[in-house]
Amino acid sequence: MSEAGPVLTNRDAAGILVITLNRPAVFNAINLALLTELKAVFQGIAADPQTRCVVLTGAGKAFCSGQDLDERRAFVEGTSEPPSLGESLRQRYNPLILAIRALPKPVIGAINGIAVGAGCSLALACDLRIASESAFLVESFVKVGLGLDCGSSFFLPRLVGMARAIEMAFLGDRIDAATAEKWGLINRVVPAEQLQSEAMALAQRLAAAPPTALARIKSELNYALNTDLATALENEAAQQESAAHHPEYRAGLTNFFNNRKS
């Protein structure tokens, strides 16, 4: 377990790394310290063989309420120049989102409460999302006069379609967990008291799966989002050729034939 700070980490014997956003007093709003540490954690575990699966969640009642707007107070009060939001995104937020998507391990978002603005984007960047019944997601950028960021313009229409994406982004309304599951934003909704156990049960299944195969599948799905069918098919063929020479394939076949005999 990492020492108390804006980001807590705890890895169990199965290789499941639980990452907890730890600013519960402000609903886990993202300040510079949290963002810097979270980015470092995701970048640091990419090549760590001891980490097999990641569960990302929040301390207290919230998952993440987005950017800590207290860091913008001086601008509102007229005592500072407008913040360079583009530079902040390019240097801090965007590398975090890219690190999550490029991570060759499954990332489960355990959405224990509100996921707003950049917090919503962070949830959408996860591979799988399990939400508490009391959770809700909000694309709140329009309410403060901003466009989408942290990948929401990419993830949202791919998950829910353009019509729903426009509705969420234009109106900035709360989308409760049940609706989010219906729309495809969330994979599963569970009672609040079961969220941790359900997320860990799923993580245990993924941690026990062949890690190279999972990494290969995640890479293929990411690749196929931005290409045509013929190119995706060729990438699949190349990946399968590589997989055929990996020990996981022989082990998988051996397990299949042994199970068929029993």
Image: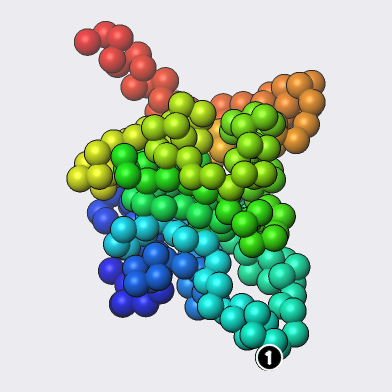
Drawn side of residue 55 relative to residue 77, left or right: left
Query: Which amino acid, by three-letter code, is at mark 1?
Result: Thr
Measured as percent of width and height from the top left, residue 126 is found at 50, 46
- Could you tell me which quadrant the C terminus lies in? top left
Residue 259 position (above or below residue 207): above
Residue 234 position (above or below residue 136): above
Measured as percent of width and height from the top left, residue 233 is found at 72, 22
Which residue position holds label 1? 79
In percent of the image, x 37 and y 77: which residue is there?
5
Drawn side of residue 5 relative to residue 1, left or right: right
The secondary structure type at the circle numbered 1 is loop
**In terms of image quadrants, where is residue 56?**
bottom left
Residue 106 position (above or below residue 99): above
In percent of the image, x 75 and y 35: which residue is there?
226
**In terms of image quadrants, where is residue 203?**
top left
In percent of the image, x 47 and y 61: which residue is there?
65
- Could you tell me which quadrant the N terminus lies in? bottom left
Q: Residues within 10 Å of mark 1 (few under 14, many from 20)?
A: few
* Residue 181 visible from this viewpoint: yes
Residue closest to the far bottom: 79
- Total labels drawn: 1
Drawn side of residue 193 relative to residue 143, left or right: left
Which of 182/19 is in front?
182
Q: How is the image coloured?
A: rainbow
Which of 167/35 is in front?
167
Residue 226 position (above or below residue 103): above
* Residue 55 visible from this viewpoint: no
Measured as percent of width and height from the top left, residue 197 is found at 23, 43
Measured as percent of width and height from the top left, residue 138 is found at 52, 48
